[in-house]
Amino acid sequence: MRTHILVTGGAGFIGSNFIRFLLAQRPGVRVTNLDSLTYSGNLENLTGIDADPRYRFVKGDICDDAAVSPLVAQADAVVHFAAESHVDRSILDSRPFVVTNVMGTQTLLDACRRAWAGNADRRFLYVSTDEVYGSLPLDRPELKFTEETPLQTNSPYSASKAAGDLLARAYHHTFKMSVLTTRCSNNFGPYQFPEKVIPLFVTNLIEGKQVPLYGDGLNVRDWIHVDDHSDGVLCVLERGRPGEVYNLGGNNERSNLELTHAILALMGKGPEMIRPVADRPGHDRRYAIDATKALRELGWTPTRSAWPAALERTVRWYADNPTWWRRVKSGAYREYYAKQYGGG
Ligand code: NAD
Ligand code: TDX
């Protein structure tokens, strides 16, 4: 078992849930969390973990080699979550996406190459996304993304993630580093930044505000609970084959309209709370993951994503934790919201 794991972006939504999951599942592990605390990084996501002697936090930027190199040298493995992660922000300004998702990934990979000097026992896991595959048509429900599907990125976000994904592949091929890649579908669960659709809609409804639904609402996403994603990442880290890509998905396709109505029903609200707004430019129509490879090779299945129970638990978490999201939704978030949705 790898005993000292460097997690990047561990103060964000998935990274913080992963650290919680990892410390619970693997008592012998030590975790260093490297995070620069951008707008989406929040140490409150790690409440309860911060006192654990197996955990330490380091504030630093993955683009800064002086911060990264000593941490990489001490680690048996790197699980790389740190990223600019929101498609709409990449449409407003793509530069931070290229800097962090491409240059930051290159900085990390190069630090590992130098510090690990060909030691294949040390592993680098790149957390990629299903968005690198582009979009599937609505009228071909039998089609899903496999690991062989060509990369066809459509947003600056997905293009920057694909660049990091391919750099990770290149470091395996050229420098024989033990690199693994996961490509996961849309996550939901606690501590998700309320720019993403589920926490945005749930918290807006609690505040008595409408929910901005893009376009015709028929775009489809494949929803997975964040704990199933964490479980998949851990399976791949421990038992995946170096150089391989593993798709992870919830087997849970929903249109945005269906998702919105499910949230409205759980919260006792009516359809008048939907505000149809202009579509996202370049909006991918449908994502659907075929995760057969992770099942066949690693025995991984998403057991925590069952609908609507998992959605209901998530809605309840936001209802029960208003202090967390009210603080997150104040300050700079308001400027973003006004720019993206025109106030309201
Ligand atoms: P998030 O925005 O909630 O968290 C990102 C974290 O990275 C934050 O804590 C932020 O402070 C940190 N970070 C950003 N730039 C940094 C830098 N330069 N140096 C150090 N830290 C930095 O994102 P998330 O939704 O938790 O996504 C985590 C990862 O999972 C991303 O790589 C994303 O592409 C991938 N992913 C997300 C989803 C999803 O549905 N959210 C699905 C598949 C893959
Ligand atoms: O206000 C909104 N209204 C709306 O209709 C927002 C924010 C979103 N949507 C729609 C757009 C998408 O079809 O909901 C769907 C989900 O949108 P997001 O939550 O922004 O997620 P998505 O763009 O699908 O990307 C997510 O999944 C893949 C994550 O943000 C990425 O980090 C991940 O890689």
Image (cartoon, rainbow, N blue to C red):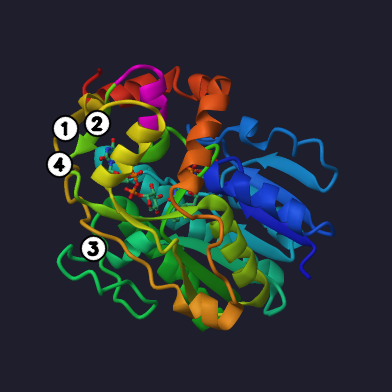
CB atoms of marks 4 and 2 within 8 Å: no
What is the number of the mark on residue 215?
Answer: 4
Circle 3: element type:
loop
Type of amino acid at the residue the image marks with label 4: Gly
Circle 1: element type:
strand
Type of amino acid at the residue the image marks with label 1: Val
Disc 4 versus disc 2: distance between alpha carbons?
Answer: 10 Å
> At 39% from the left edge and 17% from the top edge, which residue is drawn?
207
Q: Residues within 10 Å of mark 1 (few under 14, many from 20)?
A: some
Disc 4 versus disc 3: distance between alpha carbons?
Answer: 16 Å
Residue 133 appears in view: yes
Circle 2: element type:
strand
For label 1, being within 8 Å of ligand 2 is answered: yes
Q: Which residue is mark 2?
A: 212
Q: Up-down: is 214 above or below 109?
A: above
Is residue 280 or residue 163 the one in the foreground?
280
For label 4, being within 8 Å of ligand 2 is answered: yes
Is residue 128 or residue 229 the one in the foreground?
229
Q: Position of residue 344 (x, y in %)?
A: 25, 17
What is the number of the mark on residue 277?
Answer: 1
For label 2, being within 8 Å of ligand 2 is answered: yes
